Image: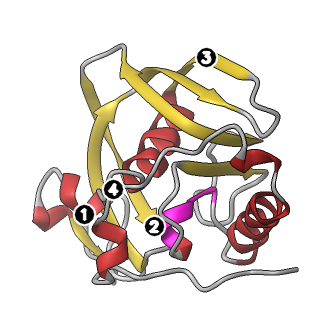
Amino acid sequence: MAARKVLKLGDPVLRKISQEITEDETKTKEFKKLIKDMFDTMKFENGVGLAAPQIGVLKRLVVVGVENSERYPGTPDIEEKILINPVITPLAPVGAGFWEGCLSVPGMRGLVERPNKIKIEWYDEKWGQHSEIIEGYKAIVYQHECDHLDGVLYVDRLKDTKLFGYTDVIDTQGNELD
């Protein structure tokens, strides 16, 4: 396993816009290693997704995938996918919020409202082009991860800063825990 260090909120790299990936890049050993390292890091950190900027690589690359998430109990499994140069088109208005967390903002959660239905277009690691309509929790995950490619973290999208705090102090209703 080759888990890499996850950058934390405050690191200026997380605020930069990532570069598009070319088809030629996807054929290199370095790119294949990057994908493996991203999956290893995501699993090591118990994440549901990871964007390349979170490990200091300013490329438009996201990996997702989880079964029985420990961090988000009761949420659906997400099939492992590699998303190269993803583009999201919202297909619904901003909807009900979800208590998001982030490997780059460890130990904290905040209520973020996002569209719960999106169209996402991307390339896979073999440069196959894909387009899919995604709804619910998966749409939230994809939007959260793709935000990283534009230097945006979920804390920038908080519904209200009063609905943000340490995971062990607040519950998902925004009430203080005893």
Q: Residue 169 location in percent, x, y?
A: 34, 82
Q: Amino acid at mark 4?
A: Ile
Q: Which residue is mark 3?
A: 132
Residue 8 within the segment the image draws in magenta: no
Q: Residue at x 60, y 86 (%)?
A: 5
Of the image marks 1 and 4, the number of the one nearer the N terminus: 4
Of the image marks 3 and 4, the number of the one nearer the N terminus: 4
Q: Amino acid at mark 3?
A: Glu
Label 4 crowd (10 A; few <14 / some 14-19 / many >=20):
some
Q: Nearer the viewer, mark 3 or mark 1?
A: 3
At mark 2, the secondary structure is: strand
CB atoms at circles 1 and 2 under 8 Å apart? yes
Of the image marks 2 and 3, the number of the one nearer the N terminus: 2
Residue 50 within the segment the image draws in magenta: yes
Q: Nearer the viewer, mark 3 or mark 4?
A: 4
Q: Residue at x 74, y 77 (%)?
A: 44
Q: Which residue is mark 4?
A: 17
Label 2 crowd (10 A; few <14 / some 14-19 / many >=20):
many
Q: Amino acid at mark 1?
A: Val
Q: Nearer the viewer, mark 1 or mark 4?
A: 4
Nearest the viewer among 158 and 16 is: 16
Quote the CA–CA distance across marks 3 and 4. 24 Å
CB atoms at circles 3 and 4 under 8 Å apart? no
Q: Which residue is mark 2?
A: 102
Quadrant of image for the N terminus: bottom right
